[in-house]
Amino acid sequence: MPLHLDLFLSFLKIGLFTIGGGYAMIPLISDTAIGKGWITEELLIDFIAIAESTPGPFAVNVATFIGLDVGGALGVFCAVMGLLVPSLVIMLVIFYLSKKMLSNKHVQDAFTMIRPTVTALILAAFASVLYATVAIENESNETTFNWFGLVWFAVCFFLTYKPKVNVEKYPKFAPTLSVMNKITLHPILLIILSAGIGIVFYGFVL
């Protein structure tokens, strides 16, 4: 099968069977792109990080990077179009039949079981990205644990996470929440800061 047709059909399948947004799409993209030998797992992790840091939908960004790396500009077109066509068609159908479909008991029953599946896919993607981040292979192909990366992950989580707590019901948490809100950093600042720290520590120190 020609490469560009394979790109289109592969991402068409990913777009057709992914429910729950771009993060739920990561396991399918990983299984397809790595399984076909288009990219390595390490490169996919890099693409995910770049896709998170650049404007635009997450899944479209990942498809763009993979398509460009595999098939150039035409590869980008094939991968992105394959990803978007199912969503566009399904959205138009749902818009046209929304009232009848959403009130249908069988549709509601189907979504009842789809929700936990989507949650599992997102958690699986999170686990794979986290493992690839903290488990690093050195030049001797030995896997070492990236303690510094894990600590920085915890710091970034603390600086961005805002717990939703009813202060009126639990007043004892009010001082803690006030402190957390004051030290919260914007995600863009964290990305820039992380890039700088990565250059310093991994390029010059570690």
Image (spheres, rainbow, N blue to C red):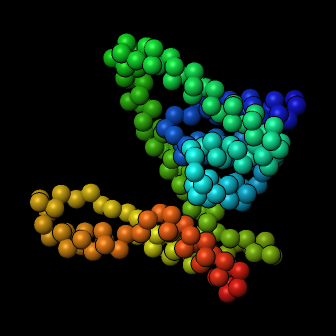
Image x and y of residue 16, in percent: 61, 28
Find the residue positioned furthest to the right.
2
Image x and y of residue 137, in percent: 73, 71
Find the residue positioned furthest to the bottom.
205
- Evaluate whether residue 105 shows in this view: no
Image x and y of residue 111, in percent: 41, 28
- Evaluate whether residue 50 shows in this view: yes
Q: Is residue 141 left or right of residue 146?
A: right
Q: If the image is split into quadrants, where does the N terminus sit?
A: top right
Q: Is residue 24 left or right of residue 29?
A: left
Establish if 87 lies above or below 22: above
Residue in the picture at 75% in, 35% down: 77
Residue in the picture at 33% in, 62% down: 162
Q: Is residue 70 left or right of residue 118?
A: right
Establish if 11 lies above or below 145: above
Image x and y of residue 145, in percent: 62, 75
